[in-house]
Amino acid sequence: MKKQHIATCGVLAVLIAGLLSCGQPPQPQESRSQGEEEAQPSDWFFRQRAYPYGQINQAVYLEAVKAKQRAERQQATRSNMPSWAFKGPMNVGGRIASLAVHPSFPDTLFIGAASGGVFRSYDRGQTFEPILDDALSLAIGDLDIAPSDPQTLYVGTGEANAGGGSIAYDGAGLYKSTNGGDSFTYIGLPQSGSIGRIAVHPSNPDHAYVAAMGKLYAPNPERGIYRTTDGGQTWEQVLYLNDSTGGIDLAIHPYHPDTLYAALWERVRRPDYYKYGGDGSGVYRSYDGGDTWEQLSGGLPGGENGRIGLALSPSSPNTLYAQYISPFGDDFEVYRSNDGGDTWSPTGTNGATGPSFMWWFGRMFPHPTDAETVFLPSLPMYRTTDGGQNWEAVTPGVHVDQHDLYIDPNNPDYMVLGNDGGLYISEDGAQSWSHRESLPITQFYTCEIDYSNPLRRYGGTQDNGTVRTTSGGISNWQAIWSGDGFYCLVDPEDNQFVYLESQNGRLRRSVNGGTSFQSALAGIFSSDRRNWSTPVAMNPQNPRSLYYGTFRVYKSVNRAVFWQPISEDLTGGETGDNLTYGTITSIAVSPVDTQIIYTGSDNGRVWRTSDGGSTWSDISAGLPNRWVTRVAAAPDDPLTVYVTFSGYRFDDYLPHVFKSTDGGQTWQDISAGLPEVPVNEIVVDPDRPERLYLGNDLGAYVSFNGGLSWHALGQGLPPVVVSDLCLHLPSLELYAGTYGRSMYSLDLASLEPPASLSGQIRAAVQPDEGPMGGVALELLPASTATTTNAQGLFSLDVPPPGSSLRPSKDGDDTNGVSTLDLILINRHILGVEPLPSPFHLLAADVNLTGSITTLDLIQIRKLILGINTEFPAQESWRFVREAQGAEGLIHSPFPITEEDLANGAITGIKGVKVGDVSGDALY
């Protein structure tokens, strides 16, 4: 293995080495005051899942979602799993992408969360209930109530804001309710990607238009404007420009609904390039309900433009406003038309400013009774009362990043606002706002529980900073730092020491229990590449020692007062790949021997040191080239380690969890039974090391046997991304930080293995020993049967004592059998080159005599020549249990042992293709 050596002759030598490697002395980064964090959205969430291909296989993701839904329905009637308990926060909120208010009952609100689904309130936002948790996607782009029938609600999945950091998955189409949200029906447009706007005809609830932006990170032709006239049973694409230009906004004339306006936005995002604008961006008008369209000019800017937002004044429908954002989002202008869009003139933006990412916003909201008043979202919300000549911010004390606004046409003083901090309501025309602390939609990246006081809970969140509660209440969480919150650690021996981190590795420490924080980067080279979520780990035996990962590992022995490097580059160097940072993403210190440290990186590299960092070995061989999300060292064995991965497959099955029992020299795929989605966290139970807890993009899972089999963990957890897990041993509580539905916990005291028996069958002779789908399994003597899926997985209800299992697979005896097999078997018989394994011997023993002879060659030759169409009196595949050896052992059926029942898994079943010793058979 490749070795890396670091001088270990004291602090001075380490500092000299650092000077030589970086060309400058270590500069501690200055602490920014709260509120000065970089606010620009990052595409970190996407990068994890898209590396190395630059896109996410949406079809695989949706297959996994559907499979999970089926499994949950089957499990619901017989599960003995405990239920998850909601732990908050309710009062922090999270990003609202869209909202709608009942036109006749303004206390009835509908909220579309960016990654948490749809919520309904009957009491003006005092309480909410989720109403669309069984959708294929809980990322909401837009929702709209039919004006003529408020019981009809359309919901478009897939957030169209092009930020990236909190966006990974495209939507799955549209849903519709005709009973006020009590139930929903899927109504199509599965390839629409993300939904910019829905507009329902003012007098016909079955007549609606949809602005589809398409896929976020790839071109596709399912973009533009769609129309349905039968409530979503059928759709037609009525406006399409090209596969990079989608629909982002719509406006319908309230009195002449055949007149409508659409904004198209050309947006390109690739792994190595993005441009949020182009020649395709423009405003279009139709006078015939969408049959024909004309692009409007008459004073509007031509050439390349970015996102466009529209506002049509309900009180004066010939008055329109259009916000044009520059292609890179660093500038914007507002235009006004007084003649229905024939001519336009700029109004100016005096008093209104925007960040360098105005494409994160882009909508405009007209006042219902005053054509001179319009609202424009940015970091704050701006308002003009003179037709755009002057603007003023009208959201004092409100969270930044405004996304949707409702103004009651019957009472314009009543306003409902959705932003990255949740829901705000004004009763006085935007003079003041109240935050509704009633939505469980916080997007957690990480969670942390104080070991000495489990009522003190922490978490890093998207755009809501690092938050905590000191009392355990669900509605009294507070932000203790700003920006995007990531790693957070509490010293288990002295909880006055708290560490938190915001984006790009800005680490801070507190010595007073989290009341105040100071920068904790002294000794870290400011030029080091860092991940958006830079890993920090604590020594499990000595919390005074911490580890910090850039592209190399740093160590502190004095609670982050000062750091020194203990490795060189463990990432292979900067590649220029826009999907990675070229950084370490996870660090694990062995609880058994703290000289053993493991690291993982965003480009699939895993390293190990056995001497505290003096030398390092690359142990990545045999692991997939995917983003490492977590490395976890076993609590009972210094050589046992687990690695989890993000990313998606584009051809073969992609495992996401690996285990090594020899320090990384060899790896075993232990993903069997898990949905094929990215895994974000794995936790090994210190009291029961065979028990593993796992969080992935579809929820939480548990293995009771070291990864041999997996089961959905608990009941009642919303179907969202579980970003992080934290096990609090003294209380036997497992906490889950979800990305879009706040935090939950599970009481592990009552957690028992489920009454099922699962396993996986793999092909023995093939080089990759891949999983075998389509293997029939008969349980005897009950004569019940099942079949392995494409990943070779199967699951059975626990059989009675004395039962056995008979696997079988037949068909196409010539599959993989060729003259090469004759040559290899003949060389074996002559002693020139013996067959390499018992499985090869079993494949060559066609006649089942217990030895390899020329009679076996004759049978294979007859098959190849077509004299025989199959091998006589046997199926084309044989199965053995690896632990029992393969020499002449054909157990048909296999006894189900007490050990199988105790583990909840049947392991080691391998398939052997008769006659195929070269490993060519398709399985």
Image (tube, rainbow, N blue to C red):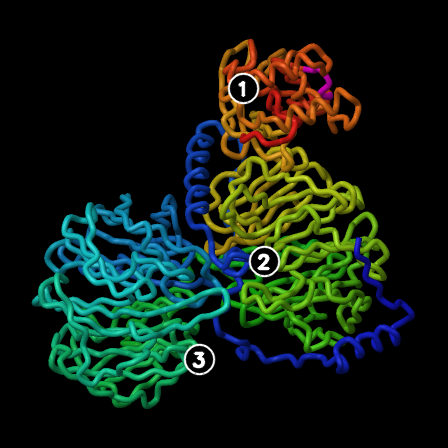
Residue tagged 3: 356
Q: Position of residue 31 (x, y in %)?
A: 64, 79
Residue tagged 2: 446
Magenta span covers which residues?
885-889
Kind of element beneath mark 2: strand
Compute the Cα span from label 1 to label 3: 72 Å
Contact (Cβ within 8 Å) of mark 3 with mark 2: no
In this rendered view, identify the residue nearer to me: 768 or 522: 768
Kind of element beneath mark 3: loop
Q: Is residue 149 left or right of residue 623?
A: left
Answer with mark 2 or mark 1, whichever residue precedes in sequence: 2
Which residue is depicted at the point 52% across and 11% down?
782
Compute the Cα span from label 3 to label 2: 27 Å
What's the residue type where badge 1 is placed? Answer: Leu
What's the residue type where badge 3 is placed? Answer: Ser
Image quadrant containing the C terminus? top right
In this rendered view, identify the residue nearer to me: 17 or 625: 625
Q: Where is residue 150 in the image (x, y as percent from the top left)?
A: 19, 54
Query: In the rendered image of this protein, does residue 301 appear above or below residue 511?
Result: below
Answer with mark 3 or mark 2, whichever residue precedes in sequence: 3
